[in-house]
Amino acid sequence: MSELQITVNGQDYTLDIPESRTLAQFLRYDLHLTGTKIGCEEAECGICSVLVDGTPVNSCIFPAFKAYGRSVVTIEGLAHGEDLHPLQSNFIEHGAVQCGFCTPGLIMTSKALLDEHPDPTDGDIKHALKDTFCRCTGYSSVLRAIKSAAHEIRTGEPLPVADPHVSEPLDVISRSVPPQEVREKVTGKAIFTDDLTFPGMLYARTLRSPYPHAKILSINTEKAKSLPGVQAVLTHKDVPGENLHGLVYRDWPVLCATVVRYVGDAVAVVAADSEDIADQALTLIEVEYEPLPVVADPEYAHTPEAPVLHPNHPTGNLLKHIKVRHGDIDAGFAQADVIVEREYRTPTTEHAFLEPECSIGVPKDYPGHDKLTVYVGSQIPYQDRNQVALALGLPEEEVRIIGTLIGGGFGGKEDIAGQIHTAMLATVTGHPVKMLYSRQESLIFHPKRHATIIRIKTGATKDGKLTAVQAELYGDGGAYASLSDKVMTRATTHATGPYTVPNAKIDCFAMYTNNTPAGAFRGFGVTQSAFAVEQNMDLIAEQLGIDPIELRRINAQTVGVTTATGQLLRESVGLLETIDRVEADMIAHFDPLPNPPPNSGEGANTSATGETTAASTEPLAPLPEFGEGQGVGLDKTGKPASFRWAWREGTKAYAWGIACAYKNTGLGGGAPDKSEAEVEAYEDGTVEVRTAAADMGQGIAHVVAQCTAEEMHLPYERVKVLLCDTDLTPNGGPTTASRQTFVSGNAARLAASALREAITQSAAEMLDVPPENIYYEEGLLRSNGDRVPLGQVVGWMKQHGLQARVKHEYWAPKTQPLGTGGDMHVAFSYATQAALVEVDMETGEVHVIKVVSGTDIGRAINPLMLQGQIEGGIVMAMGNALSEAFILEDGVPWSRLLSRYKMPSIKHAPEIISHLVEHRMSEGPYGAKGVGEIPSINTTPAICNAIYNAVGVRIYAIPVDQDALLRAMKAGATEVKTAWQGVK
């Protein structure tokens, strides 16, 4: 221990701390300033940024003693009392806060920028924040917020908010109100799991398998147990209940007993007085392994030669064979004038949520806890309770899950992480136990997006009508089932695209391998199949000489169409309008000519930066027949003459690419789909809505609050939200499948409506008037000149033994299992995207300059935050197309560091033009459907179609290998079938 003298947020401190402390650890552990977050401990993500003498530093690696005698400012030091700094207030106003975990780092880095450059350009902002990541927002709102804050600092006035246009806004619904707890997120007061501490808390670590497949011959824990400070070492022998967990199939060991099936499988867990002791204890656990043959490829897994990884599974390595049969596939291809057949490959990808997994187990009878309790940021708290209870051999009612704020999820926080382990360790030791994964542990442990192989054959007549689609998909499910069954079912059922296809035959093989398990990831399998479907559509268009937008129009699903799964679409099918909106913006891009897009640099977010050369009219060979000088969606007269699909400027090739998508709302497939919400009114005139629906930044908290406020005729500010406590909040079901706005929004809406009726009845008795004469206005109940505050009515109800509380259980309309016909889903959201790319013909580099998006979401409950979902999904999908791959070699992860996983930063953010299309769904809350996944589905094929239109090279594997693209261009080749991570 040594003495550190330091000034933090204007206050002087002198403390004795360990010499090894980083500045982030000092701020969090010694000063309890938890607004500074730790995301990687590699100086890679930038979310730990604080200012040291005005300079932003990565506090996760910055030695605390390097700040000796210096002044440090953290997110907690920006506001003056209740007055927020302009950056904080503008991040709120412009919708730049979603999960909030990265927000402190973004704001602190921006603070340093504005102190030095009070009037920054977009380029200045992108340069300053290029190493500070956000996985939620897509950065467009961040740019707007920073520019507005700069304007406010200079002039005293912020810039106006670019609120998206919506139709028929109500009092609260379709209004861009700020999210719940957003003020806490911009001031550093928001509490995530790792921000919690308890007296006497221990620290836990997990011993994980170094082998992708091996027998466990012996486990010896005696040396670890004898290490001073170690309180418990547990193996499979210590699991009191069932030593298996899983969301669909219970096939994943809590702690492995006889065999490990992937690098990262849990073998033992340790609880100790400190993190360092726990780490040391892991090195003292002796495990003898016998390596076994590795199954690293899903196609090999399906052969007789492959070792069977789960002998008790009835179909061996085949987790599930999923089938779609529709019409007569042979007759469909016989009717086709053109047939395109191709193979596509997509990689394993990582969620890269910026908050690593963390769980805290608290034993029964610890002060304030009458039962075993687990604090965790989870997408499915009630499912967590079920799995913890089974593993510990307890009734569910003896386990409590308290959901904390979640620093991003995207599907990656649905499976069990440390919940069971901390519950076991807390029970054994009698102490609270925290298990925080390092970024490196998180990378190797948790389920990823499925790698797929997709062979797809598409037929069409000469007038452009699709006749048949046949496809075979292989999905790499990894070592355990997770949600592979459901994910690969969505990939299969959506493999015809959002089109009218009279004949279809789709077969999908979800396979066990020794790779990292694969599970839910935003898009839920449809992202992979859309990559293949939408490129085949462009290939069909090219062979027929039909404009690719027109081909999609010809085949677009509309009301009255029956899908390949046998579902009749009766309403809310807005695909054609999304196409129209996107097409109009593509045309507008060229008005007036000549004015081609600027040289993009690193992906410009503005429409005019730098010098540009005159647009060349020379087409890039080979170009589609529609490519040169022809109008979008128009005949070959070329009207409007200004439009070009592709053109050159010097050594840069530019082109548009188009793609459509659809995605189900709700679980579907015959699964019971429900949510419960409880709404209670209080004597102070406020209302609280409670449901266990996880908010990981997507905004379900403000959705249920807005639904409640609308029904109660209250100002939004008077509605509080409590989420995800299995003792206090009813079950909202999983936050997955773009379902929460639909089911939990409806549950809150109907509960609030019923509560309003009860309150109205009581007010009528108080005022001695008929209930129909009562109306609401800003928290007052009025009738014939009389008025009474809501809180006063609530007090009257309590005096008369009545409860101002209503719980409603909402059941989504019944759906049918795949293969039985009828409605497999309650609704679909639709989207069209056009990507404008720049390809450097000297380097092969690809930059996305602009993305135009049209998204049918039924109704926008909160337009600004919904737009943020779309922008974030698009940028995440850009990474999927161009840079992201979780690399495994024979089952062994290479991507063990965040620095080895290349996701887009703000410097890659394109200009995004987003149109909200609102084709109401009658069953949805005020007409709303899901939006969480649809924006990320069709970006990748739009980019790949654009690359082909720019340089004539078709991309069959992602992420794009830009070196291979360059070689193909120089060789005159027309295909790239290898992705960059496949290069040896």
Image (cartoon, rainbow, N blue to C red):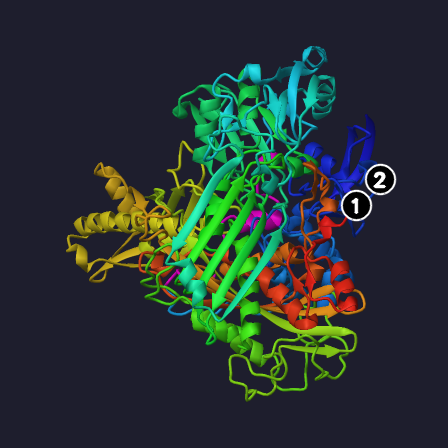
Query: Is 261 drawn above or below residue 548 in the view shown?
Result: above
Query: Residue type at mark 2?
Result: Lys
Residue 86: percent from left, percent from top:
63, 59
Magenta run includes residue 425? no
Which circle marks residue 71 in the picture? 1
Q: Label 2: which residue? A: 66
Tag 2 or tag 1, which sits nearer the N-term?
2
Residue 135: percent from left, percent from top:
62, 51
Q: Secondary structure at mark 2?
A: helix
Left or right: 945 in relation to 841: left
Q: Secondary structure at mark 1?
A: strand
Magenta run includes residue 193? yes
The answer to whether residue 663 is visible is: yes
Q: Nearer the viewer, residue 108 or 734?
A: 734
Q: Residues within 10 Å of mark 2 (few under 14, many from 20)?
A: few
Query: Is 730 drawn above or below residue 206 in the view shown?
Result: below
Q: Quadrant of residue 255?
A: top right
Residue 27: percent from left, percent from top:
71, 38
Separation of disc 1 and disc 2 at Cα? Answer: 11 Å
Query: Residue type at mark 1?
Result: Ser
Q: Nearer the viewer, mark 1 or mark 2?
A: 2
Q: What residue appears at the point 50 percent right and 25 percent down from the top-left corner?
A: 244
**Magenta: main secondary structure:** loop
The residue segment tinted magenta is 171-194
Q: What residue appears at the point 79 percent right and 28 percent down from the top-left corner?
A: 18
* Quadrant of image for the N terminus: top right
